[in-house]
Image (spheres, rainbow, N blue to C red):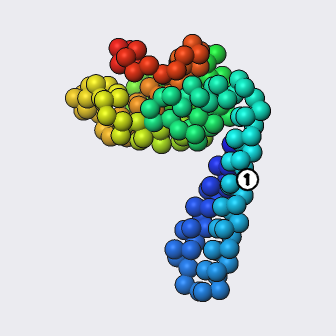
Amino acid sequence: LVQRRDQLKRMETQEKNRLSACTLPLVARDIRAELTGLGRRVARIEAAIAGHLAAHPELRAADRLLRSIPGVGAVTAVTLLGHLGELGRASRRAVASLAGLAPRARDSGRYRGRRFLGDGRRHVRRALYMAALSALRHPGFLAGFVARLKAAGKPGKVILMAIARRLLTIANAVLRTGMPFDRTRAETA
């Protein structure tokens, strides 16, 4: 269901882009009708996701725990639950690697290349990137972490991906312990 919602949202974005470039009124009407239909389909899928969460108490509890983390909303929570079933059962390093948020080496022989993020589950990485943008708006949350990265001269996108990994680590710990997010524990980590 989560994957289908992502597909429909991408189709919706494509249609909106077509509409902005459209010059023929007939085609514009057709695109608007398609957008209306896509909106209804997204709403049906989201209702089905909500129904699935309501029917499964363990998923509902996990969703509630994930949403206690600043920056993690409904879409990020269900994306993590739907695409990263290992969350809460694997180590933080393993989960980061599965999500594509662990640095990969690009080395060969004596050559030591730059580290990069990649591979992994792109849906999870994309959702955590958006959650990182949202988490930045929460005053005080991860402020010290961000300040340390800025002081080290890290670029903005590197900082965002570091926040995404930190959010994933917090989500893993929250699901493993079964306790909602606690800001005081997160700031000391």
Residue 70 occupies which quadrant of the picture? top left
The answer to whether residue 110 is left or right of residue 86 is: left
Badge 1 is on which residue?
Answer: 44
Q: Does residue 22 appear in the picture of this structure?
A: yes
Judging depth in this view, the residue of 4 and 62 nearest the camera is 62
The extreme left residue here reads: 151
Judging depth in this view, the residue of 84 and 108 nearest the camera is 84
Residue 26 occupies which quadrant of the picture? bottom right
Q: Residue at x 62, y 30 (%)?
A: 63
Q: Residue at x 28, y 25 (%)?
A: 144
Q: Residue at x 71, y 23 (%)?
A: 58
User: What is the count of numbered marks?
Assistant: 1
Can you say whether 176 is above or below 160 in the image? Answer: above
Classify the position of the N terminus by image quarter.
top right
Residue 162 occupies which quadrant of the picture? top left
Could you say where residue 163 lies in the image, as x and y percent from the top left? 41, 31
Q: Does residue 94 appear in the picture of this structure?
A: no
Helix, strand or loop at mark 1: helix
Q: Residues within 10 Å of mark 1 (few under 14, many from 20)?
A: few
Identity, as a three-letter code, of the amino acid under mark 1: Arg
Could you say where residue 82 lies in the image, as x and y percent from the top left? 68, 34
